[in-house]
Image (spheres, rainbow, N blue to C red):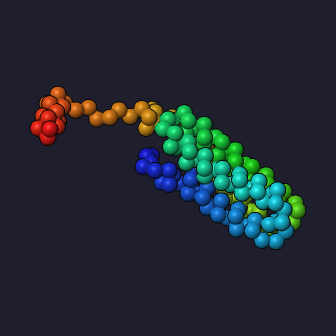
Amino acid sequence: MSFKKFEDIIAWQKARELTKRVYALTKNGDFARDYGLTDQIRRAAVSVMSNISEGYERGTKEEFIHFLYIAKGSCSEVRAQLYAALDQDYITDKEFEDISSLAVETSRLIYHLIEYLKGTHIRGAKFKKPPVKSFREDVQDFLREYQKE
């Protein structure tokens, strides 16, 4: 499993979908007028995708795992806030089930990514060494630069 960019990570893609769905759910009706809950659930959803991307870009396996745990926690926060919305009759049982199961699926993907990373010897982009040139290549580069002057 290798990623060239955070957008390639399936857990991030699911987190993006979760965020999209939360925003759609919270922009109408009584839910939209409950500014505190709307703001909190939106921030939690955005936190999932943000922490996956930030952790990936940090460049070490340990930092990535740390941020993935935060993202996983934010998935649970979204689910807890969905219960509050359900209890206030802001959302239907079906809406609750749909988005809650997307949050659970996202959380599972994050968990499996964490477990995968824990089991690999990959250390992260910060530890990749630049390619080493041979002595001959160094001399040739030097001569090219010298001849330009």
x%, y% of residue 40?
Answer: 77, 53
Q: What residue is drawn where x is 44% and y is 48%?
A: 3
In which quadrant of the rendered view does residue 97 lie?
A: bottom right
Q: From the viewer's perspective, is 5 left or right of 54?
A: left
Q: Nearer the viewer, residue 57 or 119?
A: 57
Vertical position of residue 108 compared to residue 136: above or below: below
Q: What residue is drawn where x is 38% and y is 34%?
A: 128
x%, y% of residue 31?
Answer: 82, 65
Vertical position of residue 95 compared to residue 137: above or below: below
Q: Nearer the viewer, residue 124 or 36?
A: 36
Residue 3 shows up from this direction: yes
Residue at the limit of the structure toward the top, as seen here: 135
Q: How many marks?
A: 0
Residue at the limit of the structure toward the right, as seen here: 88
Q: What residue is drawn where x is 46% and y is 50%?
A: 5
Residue 82 shows up from this direction: no
Q: Nearer the viewer, residue 1 or 145?
A: 145
Vertical position of residue 80 compared to residue 144: above or below: below
Q: What residue is drawn where x is 70% and y is 48%?
A: 74
Residue at the limit of the structure toward the front, as seen here: 149
In which quadrant of the rendered view does residue 39 lie?
A: bottom right
x%, y% of residue 81?
Answer: 79, 54
State the quadrant of the C terminus.
top left
